[in-house]
Image (tube, rainbow, N blue to C red):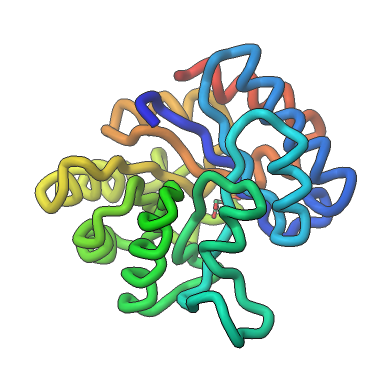
Amino acid sequence: MDTPLIVVNFKAYEESDGERGISLARACEQVSEETGVAIIACPTPAMLGRIAHEIASPVWSQHVDAVAPGGQTGHVTAQSVRDAGALGTIINHSERRMRLADIGFVVDACKALELVTCVCTNTVDVSRAAAAFSPDYIAIEPPELIGGDISVTTADPGIVSKTVELVEAVDPSVDVLCGAGVKNANDVSKAIELGARGVLLASGVVKSPDPKRTLTDLASAI
Ligand code: G3P
């Protein structure tokens, strides 16, 4: 994707289940259409296929396991999320961490299927290591700030700018996103100023009393 993006991780919040998940996805779709900003919905695994077929804007999976299709139980393969209609996936979220070798396996499996890859990282050094796999995006998120009210761009701007610098040195084709505590347009503006190509967020939208209004505010900064 050529423009900055807003990636909304629905996680496993109650607000993301069933019809509420559909409403959240519709809010992403509508605000994307109204503003022209790329807004990616990452529904729960159970809702992925339905939402991918019901909305016109892009949908990503929250996770893919490092397994090939076959005799695997309860796993999510790259093939299955693509067949469900996803255009990409988050990999190695702090709430779903993976081993380095498994991250590499999943990035390669996704690339073979032309799925967009976004590897989450928790430190500058992990970002540098993940850049060697050449995913489309690296999303830096300090775990201690996830779900809180202080944005990474305020609490630790240096982790964003340093990640941008080191990822660029490893592979300039990899874009950096940042996340954790992102709530408003100001947080998005700062992310862009720090060199990020967008944000990855969850609670600010999913728990908002008015997700569409929150998304419109976030998109106004792009
Ligand atoms: O995947 C996004 C995430 O971990 C950040 O969560 O609630 O701080 O926006 P949140």
In the current view of this chain or complex, which residue is farthest to the right? 19
Residue 168 vs residue 160, the one in the foreground: 168
Q: Is residue 192 above or below residue 12?
A: above
Residue 213 position, x and y percent, is 72, 22
In this rendering, the count of numbered labels is: 0
107 sits left or right of 214 in the view: left
Vertical order, 12 against 201 (above or below): below
Residue at left 69%, top 50%? 43
Describe residue 100's horizontal placement relative to residue 37 as left or right.
left
The N terminus sits in image quarter: top left
Residue drawn at x 31%, y 53% is 135
User: Who's the residue at 29% across and 40% down the image?
Assistant: 175
Note whether 37 is above or below 113 in the view shown.
above
Residue 180: image location, x then y, percent: 50, 49
Where is residue 212, by image quadrant?
A: top right
User: Whole-percent x and y of residue 13?
Assistant: 76, 56
Q: Residue at x 66, y 47 (%)?
A: 203
Quadrant in which the C terminus is drawn: top left
Residue 71, quarter of the rendered image: bottom right
Tell me where residue 109 appears, x and y as whole percent: 40, 64
